[in-house]
Image (cartoon, coloured by chain):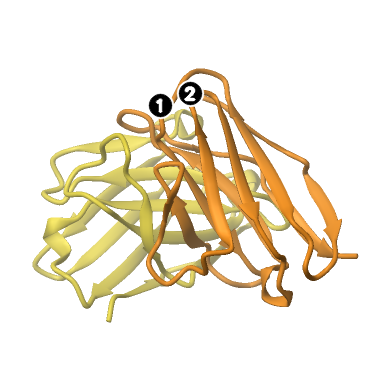
C-alpha cells in the first residue's frame, strides 16, 4: 500500500525557515518523480515544485522566486522541501504527491497524496 | 505560464442530477488535463487523467472529455458522496503545472 506521510510543519515567524519531509513507502521511491502542492486556508490547490526520481531535475513555481528548494534522499525514501524567507502568504497545508512517471513530463498526474502538513507563517 | 479557469466556481445540485464542470486553458494543452476531487480536510483524489481516462476505482458516473483548450467533467447522476470541490490540472510539457481555481458542488 502506497503511503506518504508529511511532517515538519508548524508555526514560523516571517523571514524564517522550515524544512518539510515526506516519508514514502509501498512503492519503489526512486522510480517516481514527486511533487509538492500547497493549499492556503479556504483556497485552491497550488503546484509548488517537482523533482525527478533521480533528483537531477527540479522544477518550481515561478511565484516562489528561489526561496524554496526541493530535494530527495532515495536511500531514506524521503522527499524534502526547504523553505526560506517565509512570508505570510506561504501559510498553507503542504501536500506531497507521487507522480506517475520517473521524470516530470507531459501527461503526468498525481496518483497518491499525503495527508498534508500545515505551515503557519505569523509573528 | 498556462492558466486554467473553471466554471462555475460553485453550484448547487440535487442527488440524481447530471452535473457538468468546465475547465479552459489559456493555450492548447492537447489532452494533458487531469481532474481531482477534494473533500473538506482531506487530500485531493485523482478522478480522471489525460482528459478522459477514468482512474482505477473511480465510479463510472464520472467522465471527462475535451482536448485543446476546453474540457469537461461530468457526473451523470450525482450521489451524496460526490459533494466536494473539483479541480482541473494541466500537465502540458514539463512543469510548472497549474490547477484551476476549483468548483464546489453543494447540496441543493
Q: Quick check: A34 above or below B43?
A: above
Binning the other alpha carbons within 10 Å of mark 1 as few (below 14), some (14 to 19) or many (20 upward) gives: some
Residue A123 visible in the picture: no
**First in sequence: mark 1 or mark 2?**
1
Q: Nearer the viewer, residue A48 or A108?
A: A108
State the image quarter where residue B37 is shown.
bottom right
Task: Identify which residue is drawn at 51% across, 31% down.
Answer: A63
Chain coloured orange:
B
Q: Tell me, yes or no, whether dots 1 and 2 are on the same chain.
A: yes
Toward which corner of the image does residue B7 lie, by quadrant?
A: top right
The disc placed on residue A27 is none
* SS type, badge 2: loop
Tell me which residue sits at (18%, 69%) in the image.
A77
Q: Are marks 1 and 2 in contact (CB under 8 Å)?
A: yes
Of the numbered discs in the image, which one, if any, rests on residue B68? 2
Frontmost residue, A117 versus B67: B67
- Which chain identifier belongs to the yellow chain? A
Neighbourhood count class around disc 2 (C-alpha, 10 Å): few under 14, some 14–19, many 20 upward? some
Work out whether residue B92 or residue A49 is closer to the camera in this orientation and state it. Answer: B92
Q: Going 40% across and 32% down the picture, which residue do you hit? A: B96
Asked if B73 appears above or below A20 in the picture, the reply is: above
Q: Which mark is residue B30?
A: 1
Give residue A46's position: percent from left, percent from top. 54, 45
Amino acid at each position: 500500500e502506497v503511503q506518504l506521510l508529511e511532517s515538519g510543519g508548524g508555526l514560523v515567524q516571517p523571514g524564517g525557515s522550515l524544512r518539510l519531509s515526506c516519508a514514502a513507502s509501498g512503492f519503489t521511491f526512486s522510480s517516481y518523480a514527486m511533487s509538492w502542492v500547497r493549499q492556503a486556508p479556504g483556497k485552491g490547490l497550488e503546484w509548488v515544485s517537482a523533482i525527478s526520481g533521480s533528483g537531477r531535475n527540479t522544477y518550481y513555481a515561478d511565484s516562489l522566486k528561489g526561496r524554496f528548494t526541493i530535494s530527495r534522499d532515495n536511500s531514506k525514501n524521503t522527499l524534502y522541501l526547504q523553505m526560506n524567507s517565509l512570508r505570510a502568504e506561504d501559510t498553507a497545508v503542504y501536500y506531497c504527491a507521487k507522480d506517475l512517471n520517473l521524470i516530470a513530463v507531459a501527461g503526468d498526474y498525481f496518483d497518491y497524496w499525503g495527508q498534508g502538513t500545515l505551515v503557519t507563517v505569523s509573528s | 505560464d498556462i492558466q486554467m479557469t473553471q466554471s462555475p466556481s460553485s453550484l448547487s445540485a440535487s442527488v440524481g442530477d447530471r452535473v457538468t464542470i468546465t475547465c479552459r486553458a489559456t493555450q492548447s494543452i492537447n489532452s494533458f488535463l487531469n481532474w481531482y476531487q477534494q473533500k473538506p480536510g482531506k487530500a485531493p483524489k485523482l478522478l480522471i487523467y489525460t482528459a478522459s481516462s477514468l482512474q482505477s476505482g473511480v465510479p463510472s458516473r464520472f467522465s471527462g472529455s475535451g482536448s485543446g483548450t476546453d474540457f469537461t467533467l461530468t457526473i451523470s447522476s450525482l450521489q451524496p458522496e460526490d459533494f466536494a470541490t473539483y479541480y482541473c490540472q494541466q500537465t502540458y510539457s514539463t512543469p510548472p503545472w497549474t490547477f484551476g481555481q476549483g468548483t464546489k458542488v453543494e447540496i441543493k
